Amino acid sequence: MELQDIARVIMDFITKEVEKRESQGVVVGLSGGLDSSTAASLAVRALGANCVFALILPDSPITPKADIYDAQQLAKNLKIKYKTIEIGTVKRKLLAMMPKNKLAQGNFSSRLRMCIIYYYAAIMHRLVLGTSDKSEIKLGYYTKNGDGAADIFPIADLYKTEVRQLAGHLQLPISIIEKKSSPRLWRGQTAEDEIGLNYEQIDEILRKLDINTLKKSKSKSKPSTKNKNIQMVLDLIDRNKHKLEPAPICKLYKYNHDEILL
């Protein structure tokens, strides 16, 4: 599918979802990164600038100043209203009362951001625009009930490398298109360093998994770098598969709803 056709389908999706739910628009967390910038740009093209509101939620000193600048400049270029809220101070006050744990604290940042985004969405009668892409979702590389929470996901069927191509088609700033992906949960974090592969390698493996053409080596000799990469991706998917499954419910009734299970 051509990039212009992909953009059109996504814009139609956003428009139809907003109309179907009788919403007044969307709220998006704008990080200054590739995914949120692309999602916001498509939403503006679909709905108009007045129907898109952006929240820029830096966590100083973790969030680079360049990210804040890129997010604010994009909001101005798109002519959308936005608000910048520094979450670092309140986050640190809350975490001071809790046990220390790097991963838990990082996920807390993501969930705090989503709480703020949903707060504004509620008072503005709007939908939360998800910014996760297909690569992140398939890998489970997101925070459950954090950046993984949203009302609609416009770019979730595009791999990261495809989102980058679409961003170029939309003429987003080169500083955003070429920026290394990062959840910004702690200082210096980047997705590719944490995963151990770049997104070109990741997406190649994910595509083959999608169309079931991935061939695993049966050789007993030392595994090749390619097979190690495949195993890294498979292990990450396996560790995070719980994120795609609904929370289990304790069933009290049989399927005919006539008897309680006692």
Image (cartoon, grey):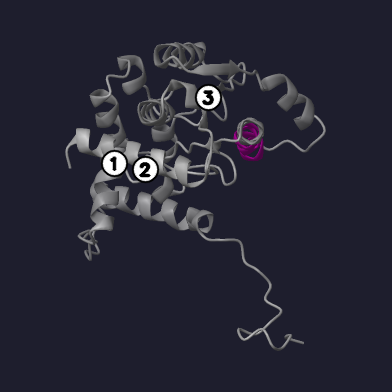
Query: Is there CB contact under 8 Å for labels 3 and 2?
Result: no
Front-most of residues 193 and 213:
213
Image: magenta residue range: 102-113
Q: Amino acid at mark 1?
A: Val
How far apart are the two marked residues, 2 and 1, measured between alpha carbons? 6 Å
Q: Residues within 10 Å of mark 3 (few under 14, many from 20)?
A: many
Which residue does the numbered mark 2 point to in the structure image?
Answer: 13
Question: Is 111 contained in the magenta span?
Answer: yes
Mark before the other along the chain sequence, 3 or 2: 2
| Residue 47 appears left or right of 203 | right
For disc 1, the marked residue is: 9
The part of the image, by quadrant, that contains residue 98 is top right
Horizontal relation, residue 251 to residue 12: left or right: right
Residue 255: percent from the left, percent from the top?
Answer: 60, 83
Q: Name the residue tied to disc 3.
A: 53
Does 191 appear above or below 218? above
